Image (cartoon, rainbow, N blue to C red):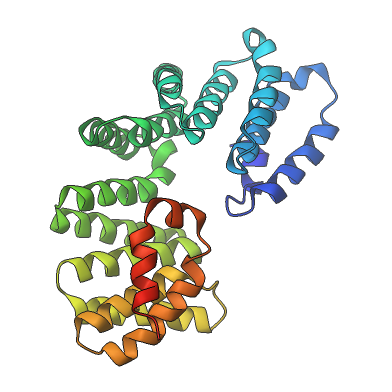
């Protein structure tokens, strides 16, 4: 793993960009072409996450000009990040062949971690639930067989779990989320454990195991009260559990807090306006 991988903070891509650009200044020797090119692909990724798509493509154009002189790993990184920028800017048709090529090269050259990354992106970008599931399952099988790619297991359990929720297969989803939680606990990352526990609780509520779901969400609320970042989705789930349990006076304050936080989530307001409206209607 390149040392710059350890600097990634996906919640703050602007800060990560600054760190990477500081590293880039230090790269001077021609022999470091591959390192520089890989680093540029990651700068492009930070720009994509900031929705600066044109700038991301400009950086990737710099990489592309030297691509024939780089090792396969660098070429795979380029394909992945060009594909991610296309995918994030709603140009999936252009992203898909890049991810497929990254997958093939990753498998061919034993870049297991990047191969799974490509398959997992195809599990996001493909146009039908069936194709997305096929790629997610292929990614999971590959990651389980290749220890170098095992760090992907938590994300894949999570992604496939939500695909099962979408398909209405709640028992299968719960099993996957519980496996994700166990995996995240083994990693010891508090933020990822928090997300995995929330996912388990969410599915328990959908399976009408409301009291158990509420118990887990209240544990997460205690973590927030002890200093974890405030999370509108936790307040929303507590509210929904209380509402289902006919504790509606208690639920209203949680709906209010959820609305206060989630009404500022631009993706949610654009894609699920009815959900935001429900939170507002059920608020205090």
- Residue situated in front as seen by the camera: 50 or 119: 50
> Residue 277: where, in percent of width, then height?
37, 67
Which quadrant: the N terminus? Answer: top right
| On screen, residue 161 above or below 78 | below
Query: Residue at the location (41% across, 63% down)?
Result: 195
Query: Residue at the location (63% across, 7% down)?
Result: 68
- Residue situated in front as seen by the camera: 31 or 7: 7
- The quarter holding residue 62 reads top right
> Residue 127: where, in percent of width, then height?
30, 30
**Left or right: 29, with 194 as reference point:** right
Which quadrant: the C terminus? Answer: bottom left
- Residue situated in front as seen by the camera: 128 or 38: 128
> Residue 193: where, in percent of width, then height?
42, 64
Is residue 184 something that shows in the picture?
Answer: yes
- The quarter holding residue 238 reads bottom left
Query: Residue at the location (46% across, 18% down)?
Result: 109
**Left or right: 168, with 187 as reference point:** left
| On screen, residue 62 above or below 140 | above
- Residue situated in front as seen by the camera: 114 or 123: 123
């Amino acid at each position: 793993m390149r040392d710059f991988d350890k600097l990634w903070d996906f919640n703050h891509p602007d800060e990560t960009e600054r760190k990477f650009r500081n590293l880039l200044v230090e790269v001077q020797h021609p022999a470091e072409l591959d390192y520089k090119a890989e680093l540029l692909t990651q700068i492009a990724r930070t720009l994509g996450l900031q929705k600066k798509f044109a700038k991301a493509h400009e950086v990737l154009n710099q990489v592309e000009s030297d691509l024939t002189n780089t090792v396969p790993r660098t070429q795979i990184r380029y394909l992945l990040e060009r594909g991610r920028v296309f995918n994030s800017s709603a140009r999936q048709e252009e992203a898909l062949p890049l991810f497929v090529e990254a997958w093939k090269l990753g498998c061919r050259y034993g870049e297991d971690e990047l191969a799974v990354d490509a398959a997992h992106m195809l599990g996001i970008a493909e146009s039908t639930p069936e194709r997305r599931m096929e790629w997610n399952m292929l990614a999971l099988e590959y990651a389980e067989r290749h220890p170098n790619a095992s760090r992907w297991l938590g994300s894949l359990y999570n992604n496939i779990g939500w695909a099962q929720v979408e398909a209405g297969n709640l028992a299968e989803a719960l099993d996957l989320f519980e496996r994700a939680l166990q995996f995240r606990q083994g990693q010891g990352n508090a933020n990822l454990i928090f997300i995995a526990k929330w996912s388990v609780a969410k599915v328990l509520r959908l399976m009408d195991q409301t009291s158990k779901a509420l118990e887990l969400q209240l544990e997460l609320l205690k973590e927030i009260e002890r200093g974890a970042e405030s999370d509108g989705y936790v307040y929303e789930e507590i509210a929904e559990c209380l509402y289902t349990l006919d504790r509606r006076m208690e639920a209203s304050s949680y709906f209010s807090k959820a609305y206060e936080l989630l009404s500022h989530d631009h993706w949610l307001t654009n894609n699920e306006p009815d959900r935001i409206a429900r939170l507002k209607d059920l608020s205090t």
